[in-house]
Image: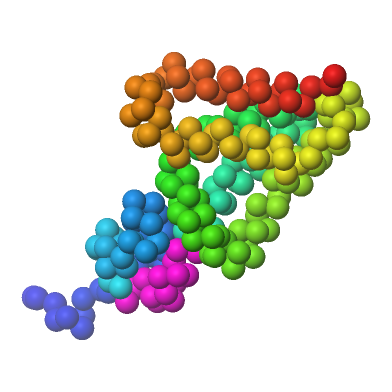
Amino acid sequence: MELKDADRPRRTRDPDQTRRDLIDAAIAEFSEKGFSGGRVDDIAARTRTTKRMIYYYFGSKERLYAAVLEEMYGGMRDAEQALPLARLPPLLALQRLVETTFDHHAAHPEFVRLVSVENIHEARNVAASPEIITRNAAVIGTLRDLITRGEREGAFRSGLDALNLHMLISSFCFYRVSNRHTLTAIFGRDLLAHDTLAAHRRMIVEAVLRYVAPG
């Protein structure tokens, strides 16, 4: 006997998985086209859902974009927080932090593109997100603790500033991804080549460790 529509079991969406799918689609859309160029219709098409569903979960395109930025910054901070830095000698702890920062940027060019777009918009969405500000403050606290311990044990020189050290670590990791296409076009070097990647990783580690060294 054929079931009537009213008798058929209803398929329900997993809210967490739906939200996850929408975030992933929005990351792809906004990292490719920026905030202005990204379209809610196209995000819906990537997930085979509807604009109505997106607005149900996020309320607006702006709030969806803010959620994407929170996700991207959170991924970097989660990678840092997973490191057992307090159990490592200061120099080794700093090395692991630099390597993790390098690896995360290299593996997530969409993070670099989204941060670049947000800077074009003068950090409007970042400034409006307490979560992004709080999460990112954590890395400065981590570096302050590491600097204090390194100076106390004689592994680091005195007078280091946590934000400056963070900028030194992040700048090269970010730049080689954000500018890799122009660098390749101008200088003819494939920045994705394994040997180049490994050499750059060693270089930023050495640069940071020399920067903090006593004397």
In the image, residue 41 lies at what x, y percent?
A: 27, 68
**Residue 117 horizontal/vertical position (percent):** 45, 54
**Residue furthest right in the image:** 152
Question: Between residues 186 and 181, which one lies in front from this camera angle?
Answer: 186
Q: Residue furthest left?
A: 1
Residue 107, horizontal then vertical, whole percent = 45, 36
Q: Nearer the viewer, residue 210 or 109?
A: 210
| Picture quarter with the C terminus | top right
Quadrant in which the N terminus is drawn:
bottom left
Q: Is residue 193 visible?
A: yes
The part of the image, by quadrant, that contains residue 14 is bottom left
**Secondary structure mostly seen in the magenta stretch:** helix
Residue 104 versus residue 212 in the image, above or below = below
Image spot of residue 175 (x, y percent): 51, 36
Task: Write the residue at 47% across / 44% down.
Answer: 112
59 part of magenta stretch = yes
Residue lying at 45% horizontally and 39% vertically, measured from the top left: 178
* Magenta span: 52-66
Q: Residue at x 89, y 23 (%)?
A: 154
Q: Is residue 123 magenta?
A: no
Residue 11 can be seen, yes or no = no
Q: Is residue 192 left or right of residue 93?
A: left
The residue shown at (43%, 36%) is: 179
Lateral position of residue 55 relative to residue 101, left or right = left
Residue 27 located left or right of residue 135: left
